[in-house]
Image: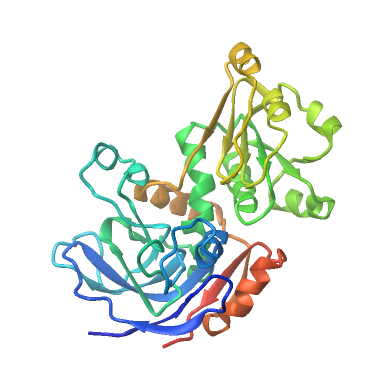
Amino acid sequence: MTTIKAYAATAPKSPLQPFEYEPGPLGDDQVDVAVSYCGICHSDLSMIENEWGMTAYPLVAGHEVIGAVTAVGDHVKNLKVGQTVGVGWYSGSCMSCQQCMSGDHNLCATAEATIIHRHGGFATSVRALSSWVVPLPEGIDAAKAGPLFCGGITVFNPILQFGIKPTDRVGVIGIGGLGHMALKFLHAWGCDVVAFTSSDSKREEALQLGANRVVNSRNPDDLNKLAGSLNFILSTVNVSLDWQTLIGALAPKGRLHTVGAVAEPVSLAAFPMLVGQRSFSGSPLGSPATTATMLEFAARHGIAPTTEHFPMSKINDALEHLKSGQARYRIVLENDLN
């Protein structure tokens, strides 16, 4: 049996350490993927530092994996050894509940997260249920593709779920790891895109990424000028916002949607929601089928995350760069542990 080399967190706030483990027998419906690249996400950092109170140490984080299939279980029919594939936040689901059978695998109550109570992709290999392992289509750069399997699908999923049209006026809040990909997708989708940012330094970047206009999310005058004009607003940030003013920026039947894990309760007045038939919602990542659709769309339009790269052996330097807030816009580790 092959020993997997990795970097593991052994305690909150401690540097990651070299770590080895045996993966055990391969399940009939599982595949092993040799890690070539693995993105770093803020969720990795939250798990490493036990911000969510669910981390079991030692933890091998990493859930934006790109690599080649090296072994397939006896019942696997959709993948072959040698294929270049990706693994994201989810590495399995029950495949029998109402949600899985309806195509909403990402809503499965027992879905397995790649870095919760199991080891992820800051390693030489990662294991997952074959249905959650998605091949990369031709035209996708493997070195940049990892973040598509977390941040990318997180912002692409609601575009499909809520039937966003090319004629819609759409706002994106937060021009960071998720928001920059949302701007690229929505621009290619054909929407009139308004970028909300609290940083004037990102104004030109937002326009280059695909925004048609940029407004200051902390300026009430900027927000009030948008009153009643947007069909959809996507918030990618995890901080409290002026929710009521954002609801006011929506056109009738408009939707304010968050993919940011805001810790505080969201307070909204009912009357503006009722008279305009407006709504507030949230969503997790997408299903394997939606992920495959996203990859095809990205390949067709030449969309890739904007990335910075570190060797995996410099993972602690990469994590510090992420913590500093200076990453533009996603960090990818290149595996040099073999």
Looking at the image, is 12 positioned above or below residue 228? below
Q: In the image, residue 112 lies at what x, y percent? A: 33, 56
Q: In the displayed orientation, state which residue is furthest to the top.
A: 275
- x 63%, y 79%: residue: 317
Q: On the rendered image, what quadrant is the N terminus found in? A: bottom left
Q: In the image, 332: left or right of 55?
A: right
Residue 241 location, quadrant: top right
Residue 335 place in picture, x, y as percent? 48, 81
Q: How is the image coloured?
A: rainbow
Depth check: give the residue in front, 317 or 124: 317
Q: Quadrant of the C terminus?
A: bottom left
The residue that appears at 64% across and 49% down in the rendered structure is 179
- In the image, residue 82 above or below residue 79: below
Q: Position of residue 64 (x, y in %)?
A: 47, 64
Name the residue located 46 percent from the left edge and 74 percent from the top edge: 122
In-image side of 42 versus 79 (left or right): right
Q: Is residue 160 left or right of residue 81?
A: right
Looking at the image, residue 78 lies above or below residue 185? below
At which x and y percent is residue 216? 81, 41
Total marks in image: 0
Residue found at the far bottom of this picture: 338
335 is higher (above) or lower (below) than 40: below
